[in-house]
Image (spheres, rainbow, N blue to C red):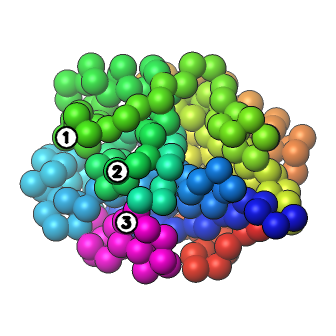
Amino acid sequence: MAGAPTLQMFDSGTLGLGGVEVPVPFFLIRHAQGNVLVDGGNPLAVARDPHAHWGALADHFTVHMTEEQHCAAQLRRLGVESESVGYVVQTHLHIDHTGALGHFANATIVVHARELQAARAAQDPISSGYVREDYDRRDLRWQLVEGELDLFGDGTIRLLQTAGHSAGHMSLLLELEETGPVLLTADAADNRAQWEGREHPRALFSREQARRSLELLRELAQRTDALLVLGHEPDDWAQLRRAPAHYA
Ligand SMILES: [Zn+2]
């Protein structure tokens, strides 16, 4: 069908996490009702000077990112104007997901109400994973989600509540015409070891909620046979079709 949505996968470079280089993904969904960005990878400031933006967090994560890997630069190279992005869906507001904020003037920023509340209340970046400068901005137009949301009401972009990793974490279930269902777990499951139950999910908010969210996602993946895209899994990432290629 002409006008059916497409999905493109990008990364804004990698982070050194416990000796492993993990991708920092973001996603573009081109939909008849507008371009939707899912997360934005690392903020631009991090490509310039990680310590200036992240403070002591930059000692925990080694950033490998150039300015050209920032989400706005990558979209521009594909001919996607920043004005054309109507929505930025934030799976959550941790430091390596906020790169889009402040770069897409026409975008409504979709986030779970509890996520924004938790981020605004956070004191310490190290324990919370939030850096206030990313989201505490007057120029952002928020759309707060409570419960689940079918973004355009056509079943192509469903936002799922998967709290635990963070207070209001969301994963996405997409429905593409050729590919079928695609499950973007985001950080509800970082990697295969977590997905397969060999490691606990990384729970900065609630270990119990993270465990339940992961269970829900596993059931969903099994039921729908969705293409699985985990939050930061290097081996899977190398196998997935990345931009400029796309999934239709
Ligand atoms: Zn996170």
Residue interval drawn in magenta: 63-82
Q: Considering only order in the chain, which callout, 2 or 3, is on the residue closer to the N terminus? A: 3
Q: CA distance from mark 3 to mark 2?
A: 11 Å
Q: Element type at marker 1?
A: helix
**Label 1 neighbour load within 10 Å: few <14, some 14-19, many 20+:** few
* Camera-nearest label, 3 or 2: 2
Give the quadrant of residue 197.
top right
Q: Is residue 165 above or below residue 81?
A: above
Residue 105 is marked as 2
Is residue 138 something one can see in this rendering?
A: yes
Q: Amino acid at mark 3?
A: Ala
Q: Element type at marker 3?
A: helix
Name the residue beneath numbered marker 1.
Answer: 133
Q: Element type at marker 2?
A: loop
Q: CA distance from mark 1 to mark 2?
A: 17 Å
Q: Quadrant of the C terminus?
A: bottom right
Q: Considering only order in the chain, which callout, 3 or 1, is on the residue closer to the N terminus? A: 3
Q: Where residue 25 sits: x, y (%)? A: 49, 60
Name the residue beneath numbered marker 3.
Answer: 72
Q: CA distance from mark 1 to mark 3?
A: 18 Å
* Camera-nearest label, 1 or 2: 2
Q: Amino acid at mark 1?
A: Glu
